[in-house]
Amino acid sequence: MYTIEETPFMKRYRHLVNAVKKDEDTEKYTITAADNPKCGDDVLLYLEVRDGVIRDGRFAGDSCAVCQVSADALIDAVRGKTLQEAKEISNRFARMFYAKADEKDLRMLGEAAVMREIVGKPSRRQCAMLPWGALERAIEWEKKGKRNAEEG
Amino acid sequence: MDLSTGTGEIYLDSAATGKPSMRALMKAIEVCYYTWGSPYRGLYERSVNATAQYEEARERVRAFINAEDANEVVFTSGATDGLNKLIRVLAEGFAQSDRVLLGIAEHNSVLLPWITAQERHGFQIDYLPVNRDGFYTAEEVRKRLTKDTKIVCVAHAGNVLGTVNDIRGLAEAAHENGTLLLADCSQSAPHGLMDVREMQCDFAVFSGHKMYCPFGIGVLYGRKVYLKTLGRRHPVVGGETADRVRKAGVIWADLPHSWEAGTVHLLGAVTLAEAADEIRKEQDERERQEAYLIQRMHRGLASIPHVRLLGPEDPYMRGTLCTFTIQGVHPHDAGDLYARESICVRTGYHCAEMLHEELGIGPTVRASVYYGNTEKEIDRFLDVTEGIRKALSR
């Protein structure tokens, strides 16, 4: 019987810690969305931002494992960070996918470094990057002082 | 046919493209190295010989699809190329009130040329649904034909549903109404199922790369009278499409040159002829083996909990592919895990997004079999599918 190797990525997929259903109470969150109509992935990012710091976050969505683990790890990686720091982490995440991340990048990525397993698969880059697009949008909206920027 | 690559890879994506046969490749080397030449152009032996090889290939492909006349065989770069050329010139003759009946399960290569032609010429497109098992039926065609319907376009074998449609029945329904029928045979020709006289279709297309050939060759078939008339609308122009070019005017060439501009694809044509002969030679054994493998795959998948097969429930009604979803598993994740085990399957919409929309489902996984796949490979694929389901299904 074929069994799948238990990698950190697979472990995380089986035990997502920041996933919620879409109808979760979202009053306190800034919400951004991102989707990829080509594969049907869509993700909603809920970030609780106070005084320029991401205090907490959740995500919801119908998407593939790569997108879900990426979103789950994203929340852990940016929890407690300022918007500026979150932006920096996002940049380093992109560096991991589009270039070569160094040790410092991986350290800064924290939990999000679990996505290293996917880096060698260009076809999955979009899946992994999707929640980070929603994060970038949330950061922009927060900087502009807006909330609930739920749009594609 | 030996599908093995010597790497332990299990190739279950023949519906997308196939491994060229040694026979076709040896012929390609022979043409590239020894018998190359400029067909139709020169008076020297090499050129005359090239012309003869090219026309002999046309005749052998004619025999493969059982057309009446070799001039009904137009070499193209593939099915998509043939469809683009044909649909463009067909649509030029359509009035705004004319209608086209398109199968809902068609490949984008059929749908998109019609959609763009509609934008240009303004005719109407109607869609033909499939029945519960994934087949087009003559009854449904009759129901949807109007006095203005000029053509019905359907796949002989579906690239998602794994069904082989009764083209003859559909063509008879269309012809009763004075409507033409175009059959996309991209998924049936590689299995030796294409017989245009039996099918009674007016036009058909297929690609060589799915049937033992290198990339870049395909065929557009059309009844002679239609190809001749449509050829006057210049589907392509260039070298060989005119007999005389003077300031005073052009005298255009007749079939088959009116559809083949520029130096023709001699290499493609001769490899296609070799492949066609090879497929015919293997036909009985191929049919037996492919049927056994697909039924084994179908039954195996159907027995795995949370696997939903598209198309017919009866394994005997299935062509050569199974498309399915695993509840709670995104096909791209599944595709990655299959790839990790060196199993090549297709994931996504398979260029038939409209069908997926119609069925109300997202992307799917498709596994296709071909002569040369083995029982062991199918069993390994089923084992991995079960493992993926257990690991990822929520």
Image (cartoon, rainbow, N blue to C red):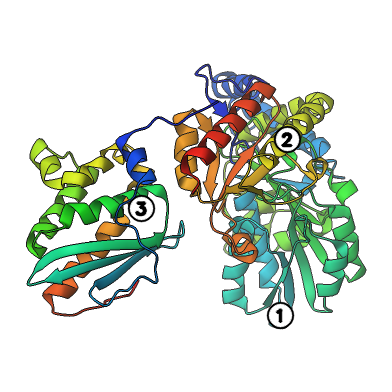
The percent position of residue B331, horizontal first and vertical second, equals 51, 47
Q: In percent of the image, x 80 and y 61: which residue is there?
A: B181
**Numbered label tally:** 3
Disc marking residue B95 = 1
Observer-nearest residue: B113 or A112? A112
Residue A56, x across and y down, in percent: 19, 63
* Left/right of residue B41 with respect to residue B155 in the rendered view: left
> In the image, what residue occupies the spot 88% across and 54% down?
B168
Mark 2 or mark 1, whichever is nearer to me: 2
Mark 3 vs mark 1, foreground winner is: 3
Residue A108, percent from left and from top: 11, 46
Q: Quadrant of residue A9?
A: top left
* Residue at mark 3 shares a chain with residue at mark 1: no
- The amino acid at mark 1 is Ala
Do discs 2 and 1 belong to a common subunit? yes
Image disc number at residue B250: none
Which amino acid, by three-letter code, is at mark 3? Gln
Image quarter for residue B31? top right
For the residue carrying disc 2, how many other residues have a C-alpha within 10 Å: few (<14), some (14-19), or many (20+)?
Answer: many
Residue at the farthest bottom position:
B97
Chain letter belonging to callout 3: A
Identify which amino acid the numbered label 2 is placed on. Ile
For label 2, the residue is B294
| Label 1 element class | loop
- In the picture of the structure, the residue carrying the numbered disc 3 is A68
Q: Foreground: A35 or B49?
A: A35
Give A3 or A125, whichever is nearer the viewer: A3
Tag 2 subunit: B
| Residue B266 image offset from top left, x and y in percent | 62, 34
Q: Earlier in the sequence, mark 2 or mark 1?
A: 1
How far apart in space, not on screen, are marks 3 and 1 (Cα)? 50 Å
